């Protein structure tokens, strides 16, 4: 079965400074893929490139293909991209407090998602469908309320409802629970999981939180310095990291539940674990070392690391490191 | 909502009361007594005393104030010190003339500013946007009377397309009314529009940066429809504020433009009152203008609530 999303050689730059380099990424039908990495590693830019909503002066190159869409997404004009966004491809953003129009009723904002793409026959049908969607995210009777009358968690559920309105082939969530109270995070995560499962949508899930990845995702990609440094099944990557950056992340975290692999959503009791700190600071965009982007912070760096480490493994599972962890058995 | 209405109404009433005291007080403390001012320095003391008695100017100031205020509340604006004619009917006639002029120029200002400001914001990095910005800078720097004179020179004198001045009531000859309205309304409206354009531009720029506009795009709206459906109402709030604040400037502009175009509006009445030294006319007209500004700002306040649901009291 062909992949839902195929990203090849994605490079994002602003005035000749590369912010994201050579990202390869695939998401299979119904698959849930995590994208993790410290702040500034290029996760959001990768997501926005797929959606074609990068800020004005930021440019993407490479290839992004989506199943069911017969054209390249990078460089596609607005007319074509607007038919893809919200229909084949939907996104939930990080900040729920500002993601909704304050002057429009919540129900109308959800119904609009369907009216834009004419996936419902009439305004009335779209409103009925919107009410149902809002009920599915456990917000009955909010059709006529305005966003300011809802809490952050409730607003994020509205955003989720409108993102799922047209049964997208792929849902991208960019840190959807980072801005929420711990107590409502688990609920929102659960609704996301159920939402994509009911529609057989694929999920690309961006987060800082290793525990969330372990809960939500089947496969994970680790980004650093605008590059994918490692990828593979969550259990594999979290228990036997190969790239030294991933190793640092896992070692410094207290991810005791990682062994159990993707568990059911029982996060309400565990506090969220932010990415642990690794010695040294993330350099500002465009000032990562050449060769291996991690080499100024890596304890295992040698002279070889001044050359770009090649990708070892398969497109869906592998790493890019000259001196990988656990190399003896390789 | 009701609470806000009550609160705003209270504010309006207090400001009306305070401004009436100020207008009355300002003219009362002006040096010279109105009767002497009206009759001129050479008038005999008897004549002045007679006028003072006739118009009740010999009574205590508080009595005069409440008499003036009470009269106005009943639509009685008093008699002119000069012509002895009632001022009320004049004000009513003149008010309509000024209202036409001001409303038309506000419409022109909006028709110019809304699209121009939006294009300037949407294309703020392109040449077309920068060119429009420069043009509006020029517009801001031009005073209304100068715009009026320029328009007269081009469209009335040189091209002869429109009358250079004058006023015809709409009921009498609608065609002529419109032809005479065009140039004065343009000179007020274009200048006001240039100022407003800059506010529209910054309001739209703010909205373009908002997350909810990105959400709208992510739903599948193209840039312009996204701005139209999700940005317009949000951008309208600051623009309406400015429009309300501009009203005072607009009325001052109208006074001057009425003079340039020989239009019998409130502005002309005011300037005539000043040059005839007819102080009660001046006092009445100023009060009417102040009331107009306060009432419009009151309405603007209510309009916010219609535009922005966050200002309504939450359930
Ligand atoms: N418009 C822009 N112009 C210049 N640099 C930018 C721009 N947008 C993002 N960047 C830079 O690109 C890098 C990657 O940004 P991105 O937002 O993708 O990071 P992220 O991985 O999502 O981080 P976070 O976890 O903080 O959201 C950062 O260093 C950021 O400063
Ligand atoms: S390539 Fe070298 S510098 Fe980079 S992570 Fe591996 S060992 Fe460290
Ligand atoms: Mg981000």
Image (cartoon, coloured by chain):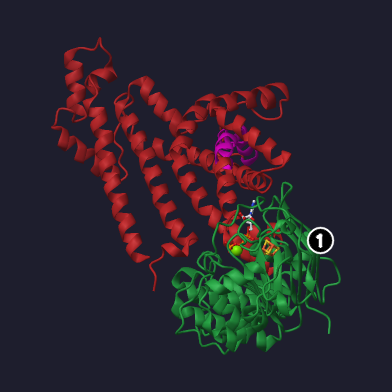
Chain colours: A green, B red
Relative side of A176 to B265, left or right: right
Quarter holding the C terminus of chain B is: bottom left
Q: In the picture shown, does residue A185 fall above or below B310?
A: below
Locate residue A59: give its quadrant: bottom right
Label 1, residues with CA under 10 Å away: few <14, some 14-19, many ≥20: some
Range shown magenta: B174-197
Which residue in the structure is indicated by mark 1? A62
* Residue B41: percent from left, percent from top: 25, 11
The secondary structure that most of the magenta stretch takes on is helix
Report if residue A314 is visible in the image. yes
Q: Residue furthest right?
A: A70
Q: Closer to the camera, B134 or B251?
A: B134
Residue at left offset 30%, top offset 41%: B76
Q: In the picture shown, does residue A189 fall above or below B145?
A: below
Residue at left offset 58%, top offset 39%: B193
* Residue A102: percent from left, percent from top: 51, 64
Ligand 2 positioned in quadrant? bottom right
Quarter holding the N terminus of chain B is: bottom left
Relative side of B113 to A76, left or right: left
**Residue A162 is covered by the magenta coloring:** no
Q: Closer to the camera, A106 or A191?
A: A191
Residue at left offset 72%, top offset 56%: A303
Q: In the picture shown, does residue B113 fall above or below A310?
A: above
Name the element at disc 1: strand
**Residue B190 is covered by the magenta coloring:** yes
Q: Residue furthest left?
A: B60
* Residue B121: percent from left, percent from top: 63, 46
Q: Closer to the camera, A40 or B222?
A: A40
């Amino acid at each position: 079965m062909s992949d839902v999303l195929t990203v090849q050689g994605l490079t994002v730059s602003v005035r000749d400074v590369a912010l994201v380099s050579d990202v390869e990424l695939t998401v299979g039908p119904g698959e849930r893929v995590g994208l993790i990495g410290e702040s500034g590693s290029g996760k959001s830019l990768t997501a926005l490139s797929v959606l074609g909503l990068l800020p004005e002066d930021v440019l993407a190159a490479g290839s992004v293909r989506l199943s069911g869409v017969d054209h390249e997404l990078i460089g596609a004009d607005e007319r074509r991209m607007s038919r893809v966004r919200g229909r084949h491809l939907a996104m939930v953003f990080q900040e729920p407090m500002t993601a909704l129009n304050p002057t429009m009723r919540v129900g109308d904002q959800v119904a609009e998602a369907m009216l834009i793409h004419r996936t419902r026959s009439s305004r009335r049908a779209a409103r009925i469908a919107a009410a149902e969607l809002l009920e599915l995210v456990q917000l009955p009777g909010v059709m006529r309320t305005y966003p300011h009358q809802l809490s952050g968690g409730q607003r994020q559920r509205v955003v989720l409802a409108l993102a799922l309105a047209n049964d997208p082939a792929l849902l991208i969530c960019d840190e959807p629970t980072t801005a929420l109270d711990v107590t409502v995070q688990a609920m929102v995560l659960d609704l996301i999981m159920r939402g994509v499962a009911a529609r057989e949508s694929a999920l690309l899930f961006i987060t800082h939180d290793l525990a969330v990845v372990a809960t939500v995702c089947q496969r994970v990609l680790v980004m650093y310095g605008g590059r994918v440094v490692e990828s593979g099944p969550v259990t594999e990557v979290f228990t036997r990291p190969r790239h030294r950056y991933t190793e640092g992340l896992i070692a410094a975290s207290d991810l005791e539940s990682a062994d159990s692999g993707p568990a059911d959503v029982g996060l309400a009791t565990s506090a969220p674990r932010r990415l642990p700190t690794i010695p040294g600071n993330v350099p500002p965009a465009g000032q990562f070392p050449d060769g291996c982007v991690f080499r100024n912070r890596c304890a295992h760096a040698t002279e070889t690391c001044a050359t770009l480490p090649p990708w070892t493994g398969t497109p869906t599972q592998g790493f890019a490191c000259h001196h990988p962890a656990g190399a003896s058995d390789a | 909502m009701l609470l806000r209405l009550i609160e705003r109404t209270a504010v309006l009433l207090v400001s009306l009361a305070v401004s009436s005291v100020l207008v009355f007080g300002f003219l009362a403390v002006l040096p010279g007594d109105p009767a002497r001012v009206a009759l001129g320095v050479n008038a005999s003391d008897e004549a002045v005393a007679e006028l003072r008695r006739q118009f009740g100017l010999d009574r205590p100031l508080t009595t005069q104030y409440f008499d003036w205020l009470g009269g106005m509340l009943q639509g009685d604006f008093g008699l002119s010190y000069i012509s002895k004619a009632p001022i009320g009917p004049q004000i009513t006639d003149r008010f309509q003339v000024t209202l036409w002029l001001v409303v038309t120029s506000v419409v022109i200002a909006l028709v110019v500013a809304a699209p121009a400001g939006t294009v300037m914001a949407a294309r703020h990095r392109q040449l077309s946007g920068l060119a429009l910005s420069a043009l509006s800078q020029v517009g801001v720097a031009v005073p209304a009377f100068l715009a009026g004179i320029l328009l007269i020179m081009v469209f009335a004198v040189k091209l002869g397309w429109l009358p250079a001045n004058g006023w015809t009531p709409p009921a009498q000859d609608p065609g002529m009314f419109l032809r005479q309205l065009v140039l004065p309304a343009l000179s007020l409206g274009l200048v006001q529009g240039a100022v407003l354009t800059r506010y529209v531009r910054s309001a739209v720029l703010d909205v373009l940066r908002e997350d909810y506009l990105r959400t709208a795009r992510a739903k599948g709206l193209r840039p312009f429809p996204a701005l139209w459906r999700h940005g317009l109402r949000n951008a309208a709030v600051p623009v309406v504020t400015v429009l309300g604040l501009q009203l005072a400037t607009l009325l001052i502009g109208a006074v001057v433009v009425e003079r340039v175009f020989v239009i019998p509006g409130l502005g002309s009445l005011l300037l005539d009152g000043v040059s005839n030294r007819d102080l009660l006319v001046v006092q009445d007209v100023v009060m009417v203008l102040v009331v107009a500004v306060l009432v419009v700002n009151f309405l603007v306040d209510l309009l916010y609530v219609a535009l922005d649901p966050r200002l309504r009291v939450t359930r």
